[in-house]
């Protein structure tokens, strides 16, 4: 009986979403305050009912209710409890419900955070979020109901895909979705501005924290996914340009462009229509990502469903939401007024370059991701686009971007003198160049041109990000508090970019990877580390049996660590899983994965030394922290709204 | 410099940058396209003689052979209409096995065999790559009439 309550709650939520989508928008159109006032209670109620539905599904998982089809296909009574929770969003239906739950949570946050906004504006924003919600709820109820019953009930479940039984995978989807779906908020803000036909100067300031918040989640979510792929899936790779990775990466790139474009719109009142277009594009790419992942047209671990009705529905949803937004944009955006211009050497120029380069990168990734799908749909053969393509088309715009980041941070609005910029940046640029050339040689004894460029670029961004905070501390003898939190956040996020670039460059350049065959008792050397294969034994897990190898790693005769990689066989699905063993370090990871028995007691092994790989995720984490610092800036909360809804926005800019 | 001239320079730089990168990107794209062929297509000579492509099908039962203790093994990929023998040296993905779908990236060895550089992992035992499923269906369809 309980699962039916879940479905009923979802239907009620759909009804409320429908009210939230229609009434406030009409109210804003006809300036009826009472209609507009319906937006908040409808959104709150929707959140409550979606939460009920979600909790009901959790309840079904925790109580092993195998009369629910979704539970029976994705859980098992022997599954450890945290993974039962993870299984809630471990497959198509549940992950859609999570999508909707997160959308309604963001909507709830908007109802709270929009109290200081003009009533008609808030009503439009909530109305647009309601439209998205109606679409996704219909999608779930019509094509992917997680509460469908199985009759007769199964005696036990089919278990969660062993690949997904992992701590990082418990939190990866909710965080990633929080980012993905959060982009609906700036999208709604953009549509609300287009519907109103005007973009108030404060619009960008209202939109910025929401954009940065969702970007933050997206950053952490993608980093978690990459980390998981590294130790669980990829035999040591950290990014594969898999279409599903691209599906989450493209909204990130667009979101990043949007954050920077919003800065210009907020401070200078220009780039308005461009910012709106980016907001639309970012969320459209989120929806496209959902389509790619959920329609089953992709070959991937994430592609659960292959029901064509689902793909068709979400394609329809994509075209209605994005298509509608673009039509509205085409009709309304040209009425937006632009104030003021800027010189070639100014912060605006650098942010424009950032935007162009990020959009070019997104377009290149989009092309490589979609082209094989189009070709296949047209019956022109099955192709795939290899990682070298993505590496190249991504590096072409990213290298100049990394170079301009370091300069852009130190520019001022409208105009500035080139001399002062050169005087300020000469030293960090020189230091980065000298260290960028020498460090790879000193540490690894050889370096390619691309490695030197990458290390120099990374050091350049790191140095340039630290320059201003350090200068303030030294010159004034005071804490870097003279910088606003927004500025500190900006420096911190860019520091993260620099650290990421360093990690990615060094790992890709100096990764040592060997496939070998070894038997217990063998000892051999990889890159200065001595590996001793001690033993192989059988181990019992809660829901799997494993063969575990034991390896000693020594350096200069000293024991560094003992690694125990496993080859697991999960009982229910009887599928084998490689569980690599990793010795984590700041400067390098040691990675051992146990392959197959080769006969005669020998095993195939993959041993890898991955220098600085932690910097990749550390950099992403620092970027996200920078975002967090930036949205904590008090100026986003001090919003003075006059009765007529106009907001004073002029603020002096320092730096 | 006038504001107009500055703007023209900016636009010029951007246009040049976009053109150059688009040209480079298209070249990279051309070079990194990987086509997929089934054993039937390989038998019909549709696959490139010397060039990397992806071969997909099922691993034929009892076809996996390995020298004791060696990383090198051979097996036969089939769509049950035609077959291609494959050689591979390296660590295998978890779900590689007889009567399982497989996709191998590599090239023909000129003697009717295929040398794989990489065996692509499947992610779950029920899951079959749509490409492989499609190849099997077409081979079956061709055999029926």
Image (tube, coloured by chain):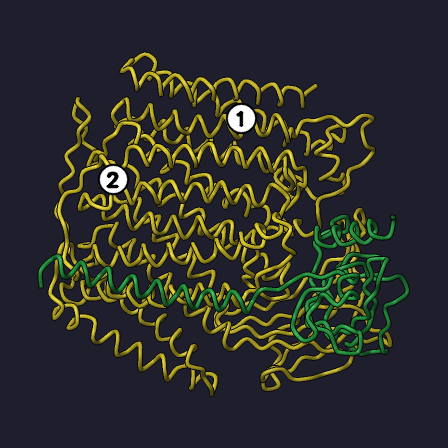
Chain colours: A yellow, B green
Side (left or right) of B139 relative to A31: right
Callout count: 2
Q: Position of residue A426 (x, y in %)?
A: 20, 75
The quadrant holding residue B67 is bottom right
Image quarter (top left, top right, bottom left or bottom right) of the N terminus of chain A: top right
Tag 2's secondary structure?
A: helix
What chain does badge 2 belong to? A
Q: Tell me the residue at 58%/33% (across/down).
A: A313
Residue A173 in view here: yes
The quadrant holding residue A34 is top left
Q: Position of residue A547 (x, y in %)?
A: 78, 63
Residue for badge 1? A50
Q: Tell me the residue at 13%/68% (across/down).
A: A418
Front label number (1 vs 2): 2
Tag 1's secondary structure?
A: helix
Image quarter (top left, top right, bottom left or bottom right) of the C terminus of chain A: bottom left
Kindly identify which numbered label has been placed on residue A205.
Answer: 2
Instruction: Name the residue at the right extreme.
Output: B62
Side (left or right) of A343 relative to A41: left
Q: Which circle's residue, 1 or 2, is located before the other in the chain?
A: 1
Q: Tell me the residue at 39%/49% (across/down).
A: A254
Q: Is residue A59 above or below residue A464?
A: above
**Nearer to us in this view, A145 or A325:** A325
Q: Position of residue A605 (x, y in %)?
A: 71, 73
**Nearer to us in this view, A648 or A189:** A189
What chain does badge 1 belong to? A
For the residues marked 1 and 2, what is the alpha-carbon distance in whole angstroms? 30 Å
Side (left or right) of A640 relative to B31: left
């Amino acid at each position: 009986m309980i699962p039916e309550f879940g479905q009923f709650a979802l239907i009620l939520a759909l009804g409320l979403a429908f009210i939230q989508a229609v009434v406030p928008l009409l109210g804003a159109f006809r300036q009826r305050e009472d209609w507009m006032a319906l937006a908040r209670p409808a959104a709150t109620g929707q959140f409550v009912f979606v939460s009920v539905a979600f909790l009901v599904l959790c309840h079904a998982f925790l109580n092993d209710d195998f009369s629910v089809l979704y539970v029976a296909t994705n859980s098992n009574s022997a599954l450890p409890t945290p993974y039962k929770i993870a299984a809630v969003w471990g497959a198509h239906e549940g992950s859609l419900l999570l999508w909707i739950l997160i959308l309604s949570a963001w909507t709830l946050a908007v109802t709270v955070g929009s109290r200081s906004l003009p009533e008609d504006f808030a009503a439009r924003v909530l109305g647009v979020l309601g439209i998205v919600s109606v679409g996704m709820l219909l999608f779930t109820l019509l094509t992917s109901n997680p509460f469908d019953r199985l009759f007769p009930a199964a005696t036990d479940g089919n278990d969660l895909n062993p690949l997904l039984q992992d701590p990082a995978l418990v939190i990866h989807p909710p965080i990633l979705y929080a980012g993905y779906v959060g982009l609906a908020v700036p999208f709604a803000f953009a549509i609300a501005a287009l519907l109103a036909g005007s973009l108030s100067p404060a619009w960008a300031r209202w939109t910025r924290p929401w954009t940065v918040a969702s970007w933050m989640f997206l950053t952490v979510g993608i980093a978690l996914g990459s980390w998981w792929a590294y130790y669980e899936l990829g035999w040591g790779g950290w990014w594969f340009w898999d279409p599903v990775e691209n599906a989450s990466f493209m909204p990130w790139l667009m979101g990043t462009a949007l954050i920077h474009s919003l800065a210009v719109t907020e401070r200078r009142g220009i780039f308005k229509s461009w910012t709106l277009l980016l907001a639309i594009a970012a969320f459209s790419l989120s929806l496209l990502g959902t389509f790619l992942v959920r329609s089953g047209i992709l070959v991937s671990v994430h592609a659960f469903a292959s029901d064509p009705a689902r793909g068709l529905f979400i394609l329809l949803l994509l075209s209605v939401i994005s298509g509608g937004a673009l039509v509205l944009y085409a009709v309304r955006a040209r009425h937006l007024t632009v104030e003021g211009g800027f010189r070639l050497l100014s912060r605006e120029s650098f942010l424009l370059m950032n935007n162009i380069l990020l959009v070019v990168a997104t377009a290149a990734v989009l092309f490589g991701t979609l082209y094989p799908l189009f070709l296949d749909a047209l019956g022109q053969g099955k192709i795939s686009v290899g990682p070298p393509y993505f590496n190249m088309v991504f590096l072409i715009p990213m290298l100049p971007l990394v170079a301009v980041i370091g300069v852009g941070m130190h520019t001022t609005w409208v105009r500035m003198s080139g001399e002062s910029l050169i005087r300020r940046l000469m030293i960090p640029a020189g230091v980065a160049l000298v260290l960028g050339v020498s460090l790879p040689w000193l540490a690894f004894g050889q370096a390619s041109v691309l490695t030197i460029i990458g290390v120099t670029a990374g050091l350049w961004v790191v140095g340039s990000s630290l320059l201003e905070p350090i200068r303030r501390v030294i010159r004034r003898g005071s804490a870097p508090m003279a910088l606003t939190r927004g500025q500190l956040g900006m420096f911190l996020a860019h520091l993260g970019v620099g650290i990421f670039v360093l990690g990615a460059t060094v790992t890709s350049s100096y990764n040592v990877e060997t496939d070998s065959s070894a038997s217990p008792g063998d000892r051999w050397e990889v890159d200065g580390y001595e590996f001793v294969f001690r033993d192989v034994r059988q181990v019992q897990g809660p829901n799997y049996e494993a063969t575990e190898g034991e390896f000693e790693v020594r350096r200069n005769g000293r024991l560094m660590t003992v690694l125990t990689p496993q080859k697991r066989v999960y009982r229910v699905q009887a599928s084998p899983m490689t569980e690599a063993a990793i010795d984590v370090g700041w400067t390098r990871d040691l990675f051992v994965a146990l392959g197959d028995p080769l006969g005669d007691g020998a095993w195939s092994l993959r041993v890898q030394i991955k220098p600085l790989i932690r910097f990749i995720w550390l950099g992403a984490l620092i970027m996200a922290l920078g975002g967090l610092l930036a949205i904590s800036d008090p100026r986003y909360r001090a919003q003075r709204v006059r009765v007529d809804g106009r907001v004073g926005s002029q603020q002096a800019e320092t730096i | 410099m006038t504001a107009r001239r500055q703007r023209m320079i900016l636009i010029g730089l951007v246009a040049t940058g976009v053109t150059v990168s688009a040209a480079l990107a298209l070249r990279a794209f051309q070079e990194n396209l990987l086509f997929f062929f089934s054993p039937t297509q390989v038998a019909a000579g549709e696959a490139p003689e010397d060039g990397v492509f992806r071969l997909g099908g099922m691993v034929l039962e009892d076809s996996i052979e390995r020298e004791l203790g060696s990383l090198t093994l051979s097996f036969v990929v089939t769509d049950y209409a035609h077959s291609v023998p494959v050689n591979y040296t390296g660590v295998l993905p978890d779900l590689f096995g007889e009567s399982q779908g497989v996709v191998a990236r590599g090239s023909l060895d000129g003697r009717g065999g295929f040398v794989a550089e990489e065996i692509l992992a499947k992610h779950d035992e029920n899951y079959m790559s749509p490409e492989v499923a499609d190849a099997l269906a077409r081979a079956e369809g061709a055999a029926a009439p």
